[in-house]
Image: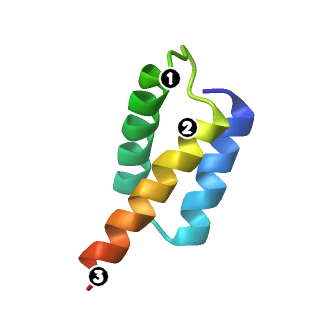
Amino acid sequence: MDDVTRDMLRSGLEKLGLSARAYDRVIKVARTIADLAGSEEIRPEHVCEAVQYRTLDRKLWLK
């Protein structure tokens, strides 16, 4: 993961108020998405998709 992607991830998680544990989970999901896309690196679009899944998961648990 490059610095731009890492900064984007941190910024997104801070805005959403997610924990360090959520940070780790988002990275794992982003890595899986990157693997499925055939990418050796985690790219911004992989992080964005992973954060979206995390926010969806969070919304479902708060109900």
Query: Is the residue 43 above or below the residue 13 in the image?
Result: above
The tag earlier along the polypeptide, 3 or 2, is 2
Q: Which residue is mark 3?
A: 62
What quarter of the picture does the C terminus occupy?
Answer: bottom left
Residue 24 figure quarter = top left
Can residue 28 be seen in the rendering of this structure?
yes
Q: Are marks 3 and 2 in contact (CB under 8 Å)?
A: no
Residue 31 coordinates in the image, percent (x, y):
44, 29
Q: Which residue is mark 2?
A: 46
CA separation, marks 1 and 2? 9 Å
Residue 35 coordinates in the image, percent (x, y):
43, 21
Q: Which residue is mark 1?
A: 37
- Comparing 11 with 38, the one in front is 38
Which mark lies nearer to you, 1 or 3? 1
Residue 30 coordinates in the image, percent (x, y):
46, 37
The amino acid type, in three-letter code, at marker 3 is Leu
Query: Is the residue 25 above or below the residue 18 in the image?
Result: above
